[in-house]
Image (cartoon, grey):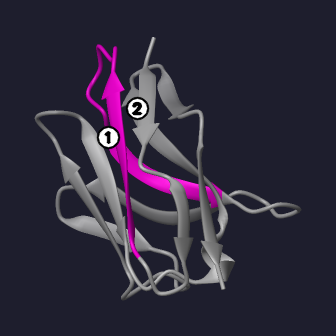
Amino acid sequence: QVQLVESGGGLVQAGGSLRLSCAASGSRALINAMGWYRQAPGKQRELVAAIPTRSMTNYSDSVKGRFTISRDYAKNTVDLQMNSLKPEDTAVYYCNVRIATIWGVSDYWGQGTQVTVSS
């Protein structure tokens, strides 16, 4: 069973920075994509940033230029460096891992870490 352990959330003032980390373990199959999603109160979960392949990164338009995602393939970790944080970045952030096998595609989620940005 794949397990994801997240760390790094917290409270920060607008303009500040936070770094989120996620470590995946327990997968017998190759992990394809790793990324971060977030969910604010009353809103749907949305993609923040993802690394689907070694040569590709995807960012939400709302975080481009402020957030940077990075992945360590040897350690199965993914980090999200968040700079110039805004109050609208406040949400629970979830690590996501996607694994594709001959039997199909499976998504795994971390427990979520709260990020609160005060104005």
Neighbor class of circle 1 (other Cα within 10 Å; few <14, some 14-19, many 20+) is some
Residue visible at 54% across and 78% down?
A: 13
For mark 2, does the 10 Å Cα neighbourhood hold few (<14), some (14 to 19), or many (20 or more) residues? some
- Name which residue lies at 30% across and 48% down: 78
Give the left or right position of residue 119, taking residue 52 as reference: right
Q: Are marks 2 and 1 in contact (CB under 8 Å)?
A: yes
Eyeballing the image, is 66 above or below 43?
Answer: below
Name the quarter where the N terminus is drawn. top left
Nearest the eye: 104 or 66: 66
Q: Secondary structure at mark 2?
A: strand
Is 46 left or right of 58, judged from the image as shown?
A: right
What residue appears at the point 59 percent right and 33 percent down from the top-left corner?
111
Q: Is residue 84 magenta?
A: no
| Left/right of residue 20 with respect to residue 90 in the rendered view | left
Frontmost residue, 105 versus 80 = 80
Q: Secondary structure at mark 1?
A: loop
Give the main secondary structure, helix, strand or loop, of the magenta stretch: strand
62 in relation to 38, above or below = below
Which amino acid type is shown beneath numbered disc 2? Ile
Callout 1, which amino acid? Asn
Which residue is at the front of the view, 35 or 99?
35
The disc placed on residue 99 is: 2
Cα separation, mark 2 vs mark 1, equals 5 Å
**Magenta-tinted stretch:** 17-38
Q: Which is more N-terminal, label 1 or label 2? A: 1
* Quadrant showing the C terminus: bottom right
Tell me, for residue 32, which label it has, or none. 1
Where is residue 20 shown, x and y percent of the image? 39, 53
Q: Is residue 40 above or below residue 64?
A: above
Instruction: Point out residue 61 in the picture as x, y percentages from the top left corner.
Output: 52, 85
Q: Residue at x 34, y 14 (%)?
A: 26
Residue 112 at x, y = what percent?
59, 41
